[in-house]
Amino acid sequence: MNRTQSYYDVRDALAQPGCAICHLKARSEERYLDALLWENVNDPGVRDDIRRARGFCHEHAWQLIRPAASLGVAILHRDVLHTLRMALDDARFQAPPFLSLQRAHEALDAEQPTAATANLVARLVPQVPCPACKQGEMMETIYLDTLLEELKGEDGLRAAYEASAGLCLPHLRHGLERLRDEAVFAALVSAQRTIWQRLENDLDQFIRKSDPHYRDEPWGDERDAWLRATAALAGNRRETGSQS
């Protein structure tokens, strides 16, 4: 059977700790940032996307900070800052008329954004999503669909999935939202139930062995169950630095 590269990527990621889709999404974003810094800093289309996004989200902006990246980061951020400064150049405070309904609403609700600065705020907020987030979300969907498609069949990924940490809760929800096949639904739910039961058992052992009465018992796989449970519910912890 002919396999796509995404199949082998998912298969290999299932052998790693934590949610395979979290890992692959993070790797896709990291590769995007690598290519941006070392190959695409001067690409006009890429630069335009970054300007319209008003730079990167907090997470990906700080992931750009790495050895030998200072010039590329400076070029990209100077570009964005120039665009933002131009928005300030012709900014005007546009207060609504004193007796207007808008002024009355603002007086009654201090948390309501003021109309006087709305035009400037609209120019400063991202006009398009963070480019690294967009790349990660696109690859996330491809990998998640590949996993779901390959859960069926004797030569599929069912066994590898059941032996893995499974999907984190956010990616399980996302996967279920995309499912249209009852057989895949049954395979996914059955495997995830087995995975969560295994983790629940490890947590039971971790809690029991944390009791001073059992402190002489040696630790086993349950030692890091509390960390694995955190990843299972919230997604993998993002590591800093380049990922292969």
Image (cartoon, rainbow, N blue to C red):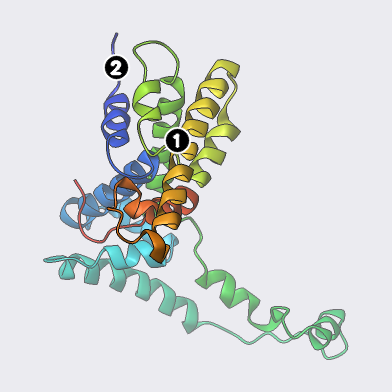
> Is 203 placed above or below 119 here?
above
Residue type for callout 1: Ile
- Depth order, front residue of 26/128: 26
**Residue placed most toward the observer, 47 or 65:** 65
Q: Please tell me whether mark 2 sits on a helix, a strand or a loop.
A: loop
Whether residue 90 is visible here, answered yes or no, is yes
Compared to residue 103, the image places residue 124 above or below, namely: above
- Mark closest to the chain's N terminus, 1 or 2: 2
Q: What residue is shown at x 60% (from left), y 18% (from top)?
A: 182
Q: Mark 1: few, some, or many residues within 10 Å (few <14, many ≥20)?
A: some
Specify whether residue 56 is in view.
Answer: no
Residue drawn at the location 21% of the way across and 59% of the way down: 241
Residue 3's disc number: 2
Q: Residue furthest top?
A: 1
The residue wearing badge 1 is: 195
Farthest residue to the left: give it. Answer: 68
Identified at 46% across, 25% down, the residue is 148
**Toward the viewer: 3 or 78?**
3
Element on which disc 1 rests: helix
